[in-house]
Amino acid sequence: MSEPESRLVVIAGSGRSGTTFLAKLFDSSPEVLYRHEPDSVLRRPEIPFHPDAGDVEAHADAMRDYLGALMAANQARCAATTPTFPKSFRSPAGNWLHRALVYGSKLPPWGKDPALRVPDCLRMPPPVTVIKTVDSLCRLRLMARARPDARFLHIVRHPCAVAASVAEGHRLGLMKGGAFLDAVFAMPEAAGYPFDKADIAARSPAEQVAFKWMVQNDKTHAEMAGGDSYRLVSYERLCVTLRAELTALFAHAGVAGNPQTDRFLDRLEQTRSAGRRYFSVVRNPRSGLFKWRQRLPAGTVAAIEAMVQHSAVGRLCLAAAAEAERAVDASAGCS
C-alpha cells in the first residue's frame, strides 16, 4: 500500500486518556483501516520519542518510512481489535474472513503469539488509515513534518481521571511501570514548571502521573496548535456531546458520516454500564465518567488540579471537564 493511496489520521494521547475509545469510533466507519498502537510492536528507538526542532529535520525521512511501516502493520496486536466492522474496501467474503481471523487470533494457541499476523483481506486500498498511539504522543510534530497531508487528533482527559485509571490498572495487574520521572525530567520542557525532580519524586504516584501528563501534553500542544492538521479533543466533551463532536472530528479527518457509525453510537448510548472490562470500549460514554472523584482522595484531587493550573493544556482540560460535569449533573437532575 503506497502512501498516496490511503489518507493518514493519527490519534494520540497519554495512556488512559480515551485514545482507544476515539479510535474505535473512527474504526466504525467503513472507510477506515485501523492500526492499534503499531509503534508498540514495530519499535524504532533511534527516532527520538521527545524530538526537538533539530531532530524534526534530521529524522523526517526516517519517520516517513516508519509511518509507512506502521500503516502496513498487521500483527494481531495491531490489526485484531474488537469489535469488528464491515469495510467498503473488502468484499463480503473478505469481511467475513477477516472477522473470523480476528476472533480466531484470540484463541489458544495463537492468542499468545506476538508474531501472529492477521491478513487485511483487501480488495482495494482503504481510503483512510487510522493509527492510534500513546507511545509517540510527543512525536506528532515530527510526524507532521514527515507527512504534511496527515491529520492529528490529540485527545486529553482530566488528569485526575487518568491518574485514577492508571492506579486501577496497576491494582488489576493490567498495567506496568510508573511515571518514569528520569525520562520526563530529561525533557527540556520539564524545566518550565515550578517543580523540581525532588519535589515530584516525593509526591504521591497519582501526582507523578499528572506531572508526566502535563509535560508531555503541553509539549505536543505547544508544537502543534494553530496548524490546520491538528485538533485538540476533550475526552469529557466527546463523551457528553458524542454525535456533534464526532461529526466535527470526522469532518476534520476527511471521514464521511455513515449509517454504520450511527448504529454503533446507538449501541453505545443504549448500553447502561461503563463496561465490564478495564479496556472495554463498548460502554455508555457518560457512565462512570467522573467516578474518579470517589477513587482519589480529595487532597490528591486538589493537589493535581493546582499543579496543572501551570499548564496550558491543563487549564483547557479542567475547564472542558467542568463543563461536561455540569451537563451530566443537569441531565441526571432531569431524569
Image (cartoon, helix red, strand yellow):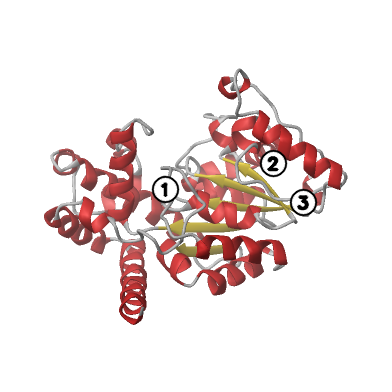
- Badge number at residue 87: 3
Nearer the viewer's eye, disc 1 or disc 3? 3
Count of numbered labels shown in the rendering: 3
Q: Which element carries disc 1, helix, strand or loop? A: loop
Nearer the viewer's eye, disc 2 or disc 3? 3
Query: Of the residues shown, which amino acid type is indicated by label 2?
Result: Met
Q: Residue furthest top?
A: 109
Q: Residue at x 28, y 41 (%)?
A: 167
Residue 36 at x, y percent in the picture: 59, 41
Where, quadrant-wise, is the C terminus in this rendering? Answer: bottom left
Q: Residue at x 30, y 71 (%)?
A: 322
Q: CA distance from mark 1 to mark 2?
A: 21 Å
Are the residues flagged by discs 1 and 2 in contact, CB closer than 8 Å? no
Q: Which element carries disc 2, helix, strand or loop? A: helix
Observer able to see residue 168: yes
Q: Quadrant of residue 236?
A: bottom left
- Badge number at residue 110: none
Q: Which residue is mark 2?
A: 71
Are the residues flagged by discs 2 and 3 in contact, CB closer than 8 Å? no
Left or right side of 99 for 292: left
Crowding near pointer 3: few (<14 within 10 Å), some, many (20+)?
A: many
Residue 80 at x, y percent in the picture: 64, 37
Of the pair 66 and 24, the residue shown nearer to us? 24
Query: Of the residues shown, which amino acid type is indicated by label 1?
Result: Ser
Observer able to see residue 255: no
Q: CA distance from mark 1 to mark 3?
A: 29 Å
Crowding near pointer 2: few (<14 within 10 Å), some, many (20+)?
A: many
Residue 261 at x, y percent in the picture: 66, 62
Q: Which residue is mark 1?
A: 14
Q: Residue at x 23, y 45 (%)?
A: 206
Query: Of the residues shown, which amino acid type is indicated by label 3?
Result: Lys
